[in-house]
């Protein structure tokens, strides 16, 4: 079946998370991802646990739909081979510290002279401009600096890192958006361009209404637990057997909610008639709701609230996510067959395209697994040529 990006070839020089996540998304949508790794060592993520048969499950979870070859870009012959490949691809993605590619002589300005149609995507901690540009960064660092940690955690508690690597993941997603935008305009102009994405920028971009709240009120947002900062009721409540998240996002839902919990009088209560008033009188309202929710189980409330159209859900642990019927129905948990590690469950593809759907076509590659295949296909090298290059110690 035809895929959306099947005619796009991508050279992937990324490692660990932000870059590999971006190229995985492109690969899921059909792009041919050629992952170039350091000889012997490979992507740093190959050395992160947990392991299955000495293969990193971390690496496997982020590098499906890619082919791997090793190449030493620090030696001249390796660089020459790389530049040959640049002539035959559409996109290059790298997540080195800014300046590294330039030191190697393969930065954007050099590569666009070889292939003017090339889309060069770079993801880094702070971007290719600004006073922090050359600084190193990891996910937790940009979560801290970008403000996300300052609004995450229990009320009056310490700022808390988000449980998933949202600094890396959001940067990876923005890189994909930037690449697709650059490819689209290239269809008109015939020219590629540089896509510069900074993890810190992306954290600022997803602060949602925190910036608006500060700018308008002058109050610095702080951790608020599971309560939404602007909508009431929109938080977790204790039931007989655990917590349930209830989200009442407008006045119509408020009326439905009050009816099904047996608190019809609250609908006309002047203290709670609008969301603004519910916010202002939150401390009076919450106990009235909490006492009622405590009387039934999560399952009972789910059925009652679902019937009324009020958004709600349990706080699923990861094992329950993998068993959730909606998650399963949407193919969001799939099994891959890795040549060494065997069967492994991984997240599915969240973008559902009706005519050109994405697919998991191959498991993450073994280090250098596809080297000969890539060189023959992209550069038309034969076995003799490849053997000669092996003697140069560039692989």
Image (cartoon, rainbow, N blue to C red):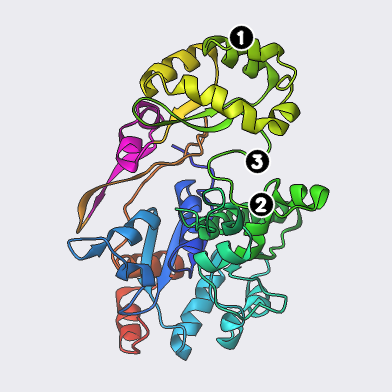
149, above or below 267, in the image? below
Please indicate, yes or no, whether residue 380 appears anywhere in the rendered image: no
Q: Earlier in the sequence, mark 2 or mark 1?
A: 2
Which of the marked residues, 3 or 1, is nearer the chain's N terminus?
Answer: 3
Magenta-span inclusion, residue 353: no
Q: Which mark is residue 207?
A: 2
As for residue 328 lying within the magenta part, the answer is yes
**Dot label at residue 264:** 1
Q: SS at mark 1?
A: loop
Quadrant for residue 142, please give it. bottom right
Residue sitting at x 69%, y 30%: 281
**Secondary element at image label 2:** loop
- Residue plotted at (38% across, 34% down): 331
Query: CB of mark 3 within 8 Å of CB of mark 2?
Result: no
Residues drawn in magenta? 316-338
Dot 2 surroundings within 10 Å: few (below 14), some, or many (20 or more)? some
Q: Position of residue 206 (x, y in %)?
A: 64, 51
The residue tagged 3 is 229
Q: CB of mark 2 within 8 Å of CB of mark 1?
A: no
């Amino acid at each position: 079946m035809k895929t959306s990006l099947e005619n796009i070839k991508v050279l992937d020089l990324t490692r660990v998370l932000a870059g590999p996540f971006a190229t995985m998304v492109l690969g899921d949508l059909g792009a041919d991802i050629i992952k170039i790794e350091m000889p012997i060592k490979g992507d740093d993520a190959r050395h992160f646990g947990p392991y299955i048969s000495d293969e990193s499950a971390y690496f496997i979870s982020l590098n499906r739909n890619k082919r791997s070859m090793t190449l030493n870009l620090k030696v001249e012959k390796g660089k020459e081979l790389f530049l040959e490949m640049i002539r035959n691809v559409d996109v290059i993605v790298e997540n080195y510290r800014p300046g590294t590619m330039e030191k190697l002589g393969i930065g954007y300005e050099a590569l666009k002279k070889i292939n003017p149609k090339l889309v060069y995507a770079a993801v880094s901690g702070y971007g290719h401009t600004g006073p922090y540009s050359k600084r190193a960064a990891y996910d937790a660092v940009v979560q801290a600096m970008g403000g996300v940690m300052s609004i995450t955690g229990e009320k009056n508690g310490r700022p808390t890192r988000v449980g998933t690597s949202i600094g890396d993941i959001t940067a990876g997603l923005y890189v994909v958006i930037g690449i697709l935008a650059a490819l689209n305009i290239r269809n008109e102009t015939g020219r590629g361009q540089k896509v510069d994405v900074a993890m810190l920028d992306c954290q600022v971009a997803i602060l949602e209404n925190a910036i608006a709240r500060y700018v308008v009120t002058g109050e610095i947002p702080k951790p608020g637990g599971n309560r939404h900062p602007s909508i009431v009721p929109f938080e977790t409540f204790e039931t007989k057997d655990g917590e349930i998240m209830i989200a009442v996002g407008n006045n119509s839902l408020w009326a439905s909610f009050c009816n099904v919990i047996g608190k019809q009088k609250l609908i006309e209560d002047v203290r709670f008639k609008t969301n603004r008033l519910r916010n202002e009188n939150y401390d009076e309202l919450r106990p009235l709701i909490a006492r009622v929710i405590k009387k039934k189980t999560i399952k009972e409330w789910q059925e009652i609230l679902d019937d009324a159209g009020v958004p709600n859900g349990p706080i699923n642990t990861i094992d329950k996510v993998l068993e959730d019927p909606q998650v399963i129905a949407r193919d969001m948990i799939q099994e891959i067959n890795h040549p060494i590690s065997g069967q492994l469950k991984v997240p599915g593809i969240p973008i559902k395209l009706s005519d050109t759907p994405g697919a998991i076509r191959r498991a993450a590659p073994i280090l250098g697994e596809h080297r000969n295949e890539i060189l023959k296909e992209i550069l038309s090298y034969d076995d003799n040529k490849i053997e000669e290059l092996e003697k140069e110690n560039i692989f």
